[in-house]
Image (spheres, rainbow, N blue to C red):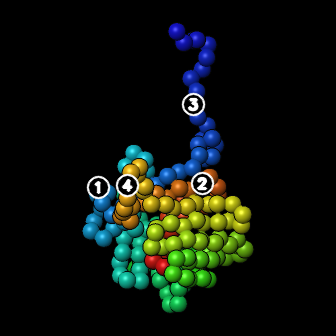
């Protein structure tokens, strides 16, 4: 029998922020239009939608369809991330520049707009949908394909994005992964 004096444990929000978040990306999630890439949580609830507007423009939407960021692919391996929709691009949030591209490895440098001197580095292989986002010597997030036991061929249509606890907004991490996958 439970002790009546023992209070029910409610997890502190600060404790929940220390737990890594897994988002599962797929083009076959319920509620997606053709060509959209969805990011869902472990209960398959849609969290973010990446919608392609043209070959060089994409929008990152929240689960209700509100545009959070617009991603513009520039020339020579450069991208810009702006607040808002593609047509109403507002403030520049960050810019990304490809620093290395080999057959199996790509490296991008992320620079935040404004006075921030913080730089992130994204390293990985877009073909395998695997990358790691670094902030100096710590890992911010990483992606990996969805492996199953006894699976000889690993499909590339689904992958996992693990976002580790820290100070970077989850929507920014999803946008950076989207830029990497274009790369």
Q: CA distance from mark 2 to mark 3?
A: 22 Å
Nearer mark to the viewer, of 4 and 2: 4
**Residues at circles 2 and 3 in contact by the CB criterion of under 8 Å:** no
Query: Where does the image place residue 126, in percent across and percent down from the top left?
Result: 48, 73
Dot 3: few (<14), some (14–19), or many (≥20) neighbours within 10 Å?
few
Q: CA distance from mark 4 to mark 2?
A: 27 Å
Task: Return the disc, 2 or 1, that comes first in the chain's sequence.
Answer: 1
Nearer mark to the viewer, of 2 and 3: 2
Q: Residue at (41%, 72%) from the top-left corner?
A: 59
Q: CA distance from mark 2 to mark 1?
A: 26 Å
Dot 4: few (<14), some (14–19), or many (≥20) neighbours within 10 Å?
few
Q: Residue at (37%, 58%) from the top-left corner?
A: 152
Q: Is residue 105 visible?
A: yes
Task: Return the disc, 3 or 4, that comes first in the chain's sequence.
Answer: 3
Q: Which residue is mark 4?
A: 151
Instruction: Give the image quarter of residue 86.
Output: bottom left
Circle 1 — which element? loop
**Residues at circles 1 and 4 in contact by the CB criterion of under 8 Å:** no
Circle 2 — which element? loop
Query: Where does the image place residue 5, in percent across and percent down from the top left?
Result: 61, 13
**Residues at circles 2 and 1 in contact by the CB criterion of under 8 Å:** no
Task: Return the disc, 2 or 3, that comes first in the chain's sequence.
Answer: 3
Dot 1: few (<14), some (14–19), or many (≥20) neighbours within 10 Å?
few
Q: CA distance from mark 1 to mark 4?
A: 25 Å
Dot 2: few (<14), some (14–19), or many (≥20) neighbours within 10 Å?
some
Query: Where does the image place residue 100, in percent across and percent down from the top left?
Result: 60, 82
Q: CA distance from mark 3 to mark 4?
A: 40 Å
Tag shown at residue 30 = 1
Query: Where does the image place residue 164, in percent across and percent down from the top left?
Result: 60, 54
Q: CA distance from mark 3 to mark 1?
A: 32 Å
Which sits in the foreground, 123 or 16?
Answer: 123
Q: Which residue is mark 3?
A: 10
């Amino acid at each position: 029998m439970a002790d009546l004096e023992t209070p029910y444990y409610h997890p502190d929000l600060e404790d929940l922020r220390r737990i890594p978040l897994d988002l599962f990306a797929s083009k076959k999630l319920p509620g997606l239009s053709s060509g959209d890439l969805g990011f869902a949580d472990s209960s398959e609830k849609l969290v973010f939608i990446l919608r392609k507007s043209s070959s060089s423009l994409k929008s990152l939407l929240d689960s209700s369809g509100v545009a959070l960021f617009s991603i513009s692919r520039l020339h020579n391996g450069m991208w810009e991330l702006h607040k808002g929709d593609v047509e109403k691009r507002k403030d520049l949030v960050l810019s990304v520049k490809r620093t290395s591209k080999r057959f199996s490895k790509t490296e991008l440098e992320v620079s935040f707009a404004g006075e921030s001197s913080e730089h992130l580095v994204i390293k990985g292989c877009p073909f395998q949908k695997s990358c790691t986002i670094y902030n100096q010597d710590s890992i911010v997030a990483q992606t990996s394909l969805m492996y199953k036991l006894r699976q000889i061929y690993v499909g590339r249509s689904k992958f996992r994005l693990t976002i580790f606890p820290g100070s970077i907004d989850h929507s920014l991490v999803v946008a950076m992964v989207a830029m990497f996958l274009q790369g």
